[in-house]
Image (cartoon, rainbow, N blue to C red):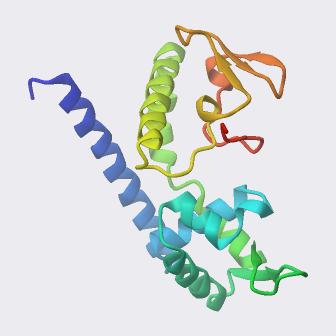
């Protein structure tokens, strides 16, 4: 209770616990597991190249076998379908069915209570919180705890000043405000 670093870690754990509780409540409402809900939401919001077993395993830090089992269950529940590649019948893209899309859209708001708390923060506090969280995520990614990130600070197109106060995207060819920085960019290019 005396160390601010420890208090921050405990606070992040409490938020993570809230996230898990909210996700679990949502999953029970649809008779799905939390990972099944997360997978449906991910499929709703990402392009075809990110809808393959190996990509999903990296995204969720799970084994290919676990992702395959999850996909099999979702397919049995008629929430997803496999779209096989024409040149390689072992490879497929996972698509949401109409029913799967409806559930993904309904459940994608499970974090609304956390969002409500964030909405109450003033603009400056939000920006400080966001940059701080980006730095924590970047560090966790750099040491291999989180395998896949598509955020500005780890993107080949991104540049920042030495003090980290100015941000620039070479793809968009424009200066970025803190609020423009992305956590999950569709145009992300991993630094070589």
Relative height, residue 62 to residue 146 (above, below): below
Pinpoint residue 90: horizontal percent, then vertical percent. Answer: 75, 85
Image position, residue 50 (x, y; %): 71, 61
On-image quarter of the C terminus: top right
Q: Is residue 105 left or right of residue 130?
A: right
Q: Residue at x 60, y 34 (%)?
A: 154
At a point 57% along the width and 53% down the height, the residue shown is: 109
Query: Which residue, as the protein is rendered here, is positioned at the far left?
Result: 2
- Report the residue at 84% width, 20% height from top: 173
Relative height, residue 55 to residue 188 (above, below): below
Quarter placement of the N terminus: top left
Q: Position of residue 169 (x, y in %)?
A: 75, 23
Residue closest to the far right: 86
Residue 142 to residue 167: above or below: below
Say which of 64 and 134 sits in front.
Answer: 64
Residue 131 rendering spot, x and y as whole percentages? 50, 23
């Amino acid at each position: 209770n005396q160390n601010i670093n420890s208090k921050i870690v405990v606070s992040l754990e409490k938020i993570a616990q809230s996230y898990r509780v909210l996700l679990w409540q949502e999953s029970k409402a649809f008779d799905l597991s939390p990972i099944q809900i997360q997978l449906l939401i991910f499929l709703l919001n990402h392009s075809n190249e990110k809808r393959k077993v190996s990509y999903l395993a990296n995204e969720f830090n799970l084994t290919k076998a676990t992702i395959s089992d999850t996909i099999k269950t979702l397919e049995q529940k008629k929430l997803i379908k496999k779209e096989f590649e024409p040149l390689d019948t072992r490879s497929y893209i996972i698509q949401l069915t109409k029913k799967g899309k409806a559930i993904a859209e309904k459940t994608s708001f499970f974090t609304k209570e956390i969002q409500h708390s964030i909405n109450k923060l003033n603009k400056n506090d939000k920006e400080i919180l966001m940059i701080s969280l980006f730095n924590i995520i970047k560090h966790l990614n750099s040491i291999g705890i989180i395998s896949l990130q598509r955020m500005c600070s780890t993107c080949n197109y991104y540049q920042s000043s030495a003090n980290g106060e100015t941000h620039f995207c070479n793809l968009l060819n424009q200066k970025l405000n803190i609020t423009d920085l992305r956590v999950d960019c569709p145009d992300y290019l991993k630094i070589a």
